[in-house]
Image: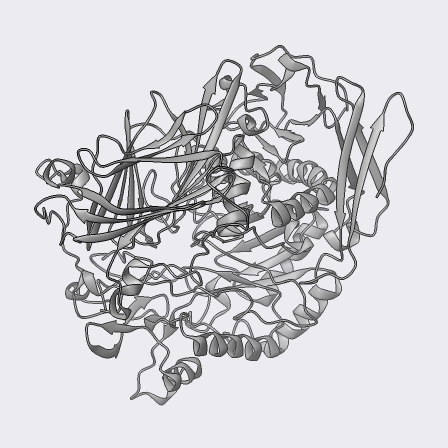
Amino acid sequence: MRAIYLLYLVLGITGQTTLDQPPGLNTFTPTPTLTSSLNLAPSVTPNIIDPKAPNAQSLCAGYKASNVVTNNASITADLTLAGAACDVYGNDILDLLLEVEYQNATRLNVKVYPKYIVPSNRSLYILDDSLSPSGSIDLGSTAASSELIFEWSNEPSFQFRVVRKGSGETIFDTYGSKIVFEDQFLEVVTSMVPSYNIYGLPEAIRGSFRLPNNYVQTFWNQYNEMNDQPIDANMHCVHPVYLETRYGDNSSKSHVVYGRNLHGQEWIMRPEQLIYRTIGGSIDFYFFSGPTPTEAIAQQQVGVIKTAAMQPYWSFGFHQVRWGYQNWTVLQNIIDGYADANIQLEAIWNDLDYLLQYRIFTHDNNTYPVPQGQEFLTRLHANGQYWMPILDPNVYVPDPTNATDANPTYNRGDELGLYIRRGEGHEDYYVGDQWPGFSVWPDFLLERTQDFWTNEMIMYHEQLAFDGWWLDISDLSSWCTGSCGTGRLDLNPIHVPFKLPGEPGQINYDYPEAFDITNATEAASASHWGGDTNSRWGNMYMTIPQALTFSVAGVPYFGVETCGFNGNTDMELCTRWMELSAFFPFYRNHNSRNTIAQEAFRWATTAEGTRRAMHVRFQLLPYWYTLFYHAHTRGDTVLRALSWNFPNEEILKSVDNQFMVGPSILVTPVLAPLLQQSQGVFPGVATGTRWYDWYTLQEVQASPGQNVSLPAPLEVIPVHLRGGTIIASQKPGNTTKTTRMNPWTFIVALNKNEQAHGDLYLDDGVSLEPSDIKIVTVSRSRFSNKKVVC
């Protein structure tokens, strides 16, 4: 089988896979029910819950280091198996290489990989930079200039630790354990300090931002249509990175650990250990010294995974979609509903409904005819609004004996031979079962695939002028086990089907800044949508830990299905959720067919709460855009835990019912029903931080560590401004375009020294490479009228 990088588990779903299609949504005829022989998957027990599973640490011998060479900025060595092969979950690799690089003052890289790499096995063990960026030694970097030290021992077998130079504190420690390196099983164990504080490792839906010390995070990408958001389970993403914070007396230090690997993984948290396991690739750890949380996260981005791309200005507006918008007329009615309610709507989206029998790059001529769509889009664009259709990577395989079943997209790809194949010597395509029926997937690791995909988008844009793509199910997914008809779980294709590096695969018309979003991401992704969440209060709460977790991974543009996707919402829940999501970068309302309508104008109270929250959001648009400029240029975080902006206050380490937008905006939402107030703390007041109510601009009086009850009628979400901040604002218009033409206001919140400062980034908001930009810095003091603008 061709050895490639990202493992995808395609769950076998027993029983019927036909869909109960409500009448009138489109002309799709469900595909015939697949037989159980195509759907059944073997029963497999994970070793973490199998009491009879062998323990690699007790059975394996580890390695011995030899031929150690130490240079100014690196260490290399041979690692040779220290005893008999244990072959617990595969064949032990006898000879390995160790590479340690002091890449700069704050970044240390430790690699362990097989010594004998040949073309036939290289992609199994070596992760190419085109799939996931890596770091290198900066010019002039040396071990002497590093804030981190690599220590190692050969007794009883090779083990290592990473230590802070100044304090001698160990941040990663494999002493007392063994490195296990087999062809399908790698294990590294690090000791942890008591009651450790670690965050990150997305994606999973969890009840807390701070990870518990008896927890397993699995990375094995899946799309499960029956349960798209399982609690505490693997989902769509591979972001093997965590932030750890350790507290002292009124102080703290944080570091980031990134395990560069895209194979299936487990990160097993135990009270005194963190166990890392993967079933492929190599050991490739990056350590970032911080010492503050935001510095450590930025070091990861700038040095290795690279900073996030800028998003177009209009992407910060409000977006609306539903699975079940039957035709262009329904879309127009939704747009009119928002206009009548005086609620800003930036973009209308389409779920699968617009497609002919769910086949990509098509349209249903009965419900979404092209001429009517062109008229609709002309009106939409003239009003400064946008259209975002869904795009799945599966390509329907037509019946070759039925001329009416033709699929030109499939035929063009077939002529180029660019679909993923079964492997193991089979030249036929891997065939899965997805929304349109039997489907194949383009192999985006092939250059000709990128050209093919770009051409398909160009041809479609010539018919219907979309403004971006919503990339759904972009982790390979199928309702068959393995290639349909094989029953082979091990024949699931195991590489990224929808990985488009850089600009190829995107089309440029007058070089606008592209906007697309997906829920299957890895390191170096700029945006992520949080998947099909449930319409429950608990699920709304968990979106805050989910959002903060993606900030750890360096993914700043994040949002969720506001009001919930699955199940019926209600007025109160939808109102509170519309208010909360107004302070997430990606702001979209989306729900499923067969549920009640939940657009923000459906209830008068929800409409009023949305108008008020959206008014604040639009006032803050220049602030949002400036935050994303800093994320793009220096790796700043956008959504932040309170403990990141106030890293010396240990009391904040588990706070996830509040969050901050950048360094200055504190959000304290209502997260439970039947409440007219929210509860929150005001960090920093012990050291003189001042806080101001956003709506009244009155200073808040609070005591250190005090949990304050904040008035929050149903139409209001409490928002506070940090002292020492200057916010540049514009009067909200109907869209981001009209807002950008409105007058400016500067909101000044003085700190304890009666001073404030702020900055502002300006460009045209749409160009990939804007030629006319401005960066403005403003400062103000009660004792001086002087402003510094540059």
Q: Colour scheme used in the picture?
A: one colour
Quadrant (top left, top right, bottom left, bottom right) of the C terminus = top right
- Along the horizontal axis of the image, is 76 left or right of 316? left
The picture places residue 253, in percent across and down from the top left corner, at 49, 26
* Quadrant of the rendered image containing residue 701: top right
Q: Residue furthest top?
A: 703
**Figure label count:** 0
The picture places residue 43, in percent across and down from the top left corner, at 14, 51
Residue drawn at the location 76% of the way across and 62% of the way down: 771
The picture places residue 357, in percent across and down from the top left corner, at 41, 72
- Residue 281 seen anywhere in this rendered image of the structure: yes
Residue drawn at the location 70% of the way across and 60% of the way down: 766
- Along the horizontal axis of the image, is 784 left or right of 92? right
Q: Looking at the picture, does residue 782 appear above or below residue 218?
A: above
Nearest the eye: 98 or 600: 98
- Along the horizontal axis of the image, is 764 left or right of 193? right
Nearest the eye: 152 or 10: 152
Q: Looking at the picture, does residue 528 appear above or below residue 709?
A: below
Quadrant (top left, top right, bottom left, bottom right) of the N terminus = bottom left
Q: Looking at the picture, does residue 412 appear above or below residue 9?
A: below
Nearest the eye: 749 or 647: 647
Q: Looking at the picture, does residue 454 appear above or below residue 146?
A: below
- Residue 554 seen anywhere in this rendered image of the structure: no
